[in-house]
Image (cartoon, rainbow, N blue to C red):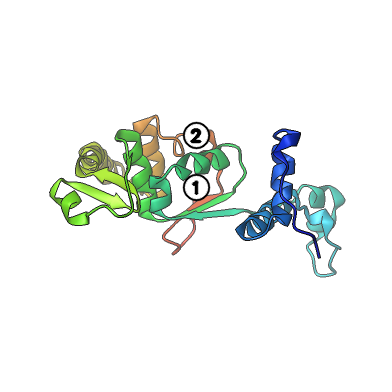
Amino acid sequence: VHGVKGYDFNEGLNYDKLLDSLATTGFQASNISKAEQLIKNMLQWRLSHEPIQENEDEEFKQQSVRENTKCTIYLGYTSNLVSSGLREIIRYLCQHKLVDIVVTTAGGVEEDFIKCLAPTYLGEFDLNDSELRQNFINRIGNLLVPNTNYCVFEDWVGPIFEEMYLEQKQKGTIFSPSSIIKRLGEKINNCLLYTSDAADDLLCVDLGGRRIIKKK
C-alpha cells in the first residue's frame, strides 16, 4: 500500500518524475500510471526474459534470437481520433517504430487524408446540430468539419481511383486495401502517416478488424 503524494513543482519540471508521481496521486492519475507501466513493459520486453520452454522451436532457444525478439505491438484507433489532434501522436508512434501493426477503419484512413487537404476546427460539444447542418458543418464531438472538406477529398480521390481502375483493367494490377492506401499517400505527398518511412515498415494494416493485409 502506497501513501498518497503528488508531484512537487517547486523541484522544477522533470517529466520522468512527474509521470512516476501519478502512481501515488490518486483518482484517474493512478490509472494513467498503470497504462504507462504497461507501455514500458511492451517496449522493454524481450523473449530472453522468459524461461525456455521444451516445445519451443530450436531457433527461439538461441540466446541471441531471444534477446532480439520483441513484443509485436498493435495500435487500434477509430476515425474520430484521427479527426482530433491525436493524429499527430499516431504519426509519431509509427514514424519512430513504436508500433508494428495498425488496426483502423476505412474512416480512419479517409479522415487522415482529409486533414491533409483541409482543416478541422474546434467548436463546442453543445452546439445546435440542426443549425450546423443548415450551415453545411458536421460535428464530431467538439470538432467541426465543413462539408466542403469532404467535397475537396472526393474531387482529389476520384481521379486517382479512375487511374487505378484503368491500371487494373490494362495491366491486371490487383489492389489490396493497403496498396490503395500507399498509392494515395504517394499522390498526396504530404500526409503525416501514409508517406512516412514508418508506414512502409509496419508489418501490416488491418481495416475494420476483419483481416490482416500484408504490406510486403
Q: Report which residue position mark 1 lands on.
A: 215
Residue labelled with disc 2 = 196
Q: Answer yes or no: do the residues labelled 2 and 1 have beta carbons within 8 Å?
A: no
Q: Quadrant of residue 105?
A: bottom left
Residue at 85% x, 63% y is: 52
Q: Secondary structure at mark 2?
A: loop
Nearer the observer, 196 or 8: 8
Q: Is residue 64 left or right of residue 140?
A: right
* Whether residue 165 is visible: no
Task: Categorize mark 1 by other alpha carbons within 10 Å: few (<14), some (14-19), many (20+).
Answer: some
Hey, what amino acid is under mark 1? Lys
> From the viewer's perspective, is the residue at label 2 or at label 1 nearer?
2
Indicate left or right for 145 with 16 as reference.
left
Give the spatial CA distance, label 2 vs label 1: 14 Å
Q: Residue 37: horizontal and vertical position, in percent?
A: 71, 54
x 63%, y 61%: residue = 27
Which percent across, then down, holds residue 160? Answer: 26, 38
The residue positioned 61% from the left and 59% from the top of the image is 28
| SS at circle 1 | loop
Q: In the picture provided, is 136 more to the left or to the right than 204?
A: left
Q: Residue at x 72, y 33 (%)?
A: 12
- In this view, the residue farthest toward the left is 134
Q: How would you rate the neighbour count of disc 2 (Cα within 10 Å): few for under 14, some for 14-19, many for 20 or more?
A: some
